[in-house]
Image: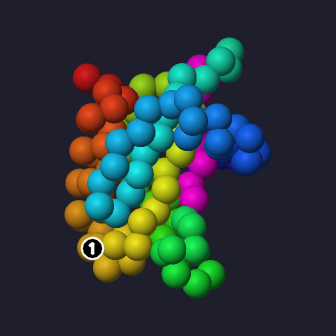
Amino acid sequence: MKRSSRLTRGDEIKCVRRKGISFAHHAVVLGFLPNQLQLNENRVAITAGRSVGGAVQRNLAKRRLRSAYRYYETNLQQGYDLVLIARKPILEADYQSLLDGLKTLFDQAGLMKE
């Protein structure tokens, strides 16, 4: 994931959460909103709140989510701002169920390419 394709500012993330559409899985929440970029690329923010655990657990959750996102990155439609929020069960979920859950969220959102 390139640095230029990250959502880093808090106001941008809040905008996606407020104005966008979100779908939930037991381990992940996906929020998305079409962006107004001319480059036609996705920008992503991956977060984990304190409810996930301490700093070590939050970083583990974000690493797992980043890896799962990279798995589907090339199969997604472009032109969206995405926010992936980790939930506590992500720490106990095996990697395949995390991939399946993320694919389900992307399918529900209509973001997967045909």
Task: Tell me if residue 44 is in the magenta stretch.
Answer: yes
Residue 110 is situated, as x and y percent measured from the top left of the image, at 31, 27
Seen from the viewer's position, the closer of residues 4 and 46 is 46
Numbered disc 1: secondary structure: loop
Q: Is residue 91 above or below residue 83?
A: below
Residue 74: in sight, yes or no? no
> Image quadrant of residue 94?
bottom left
Quadrant of the frame with the C terminus:
top left
The residue positioned 31% from the left and 43% from the top of the image is: 105
Residue at point 60%, 49% (across, down): 45
Quadrant in which residue 27 is drawn: bottom left
Seen in the picture, residue 20 relative to 55 is either above or below; the reply is above
The residue singled out by tag 1 in the image is 94
Q: Is residue 64 left or right of residue 23?
A: right
Residue 61 drawn at (x, y percent): 48, 71
Query: Which region of the structure is painted magenta?
Result: 39-47
Above or below, 20 against 66 in this view is: above
How far across and how far down the image is residue 60, in percent?
51, 76
- The reply to whether residue 41 is in sight is yes
Residue 75: x, y in percent?
A: 36, 35
Q: Quadrant of residue 58?
A: bottom right
Classify mark 1: residues with Cα within 10 Å, few (<14), some (14-19) or many (20+). Answer: few
Indicate whether residue 42 is drawn in magenta.
Answer: yes
Q: Is residue 68 above or below residue 111?
A: below
Q: At label 1, which amino acid type do we have?
A: Asp
Query: What scheme was used to colour the molecule?
Result: rainbow
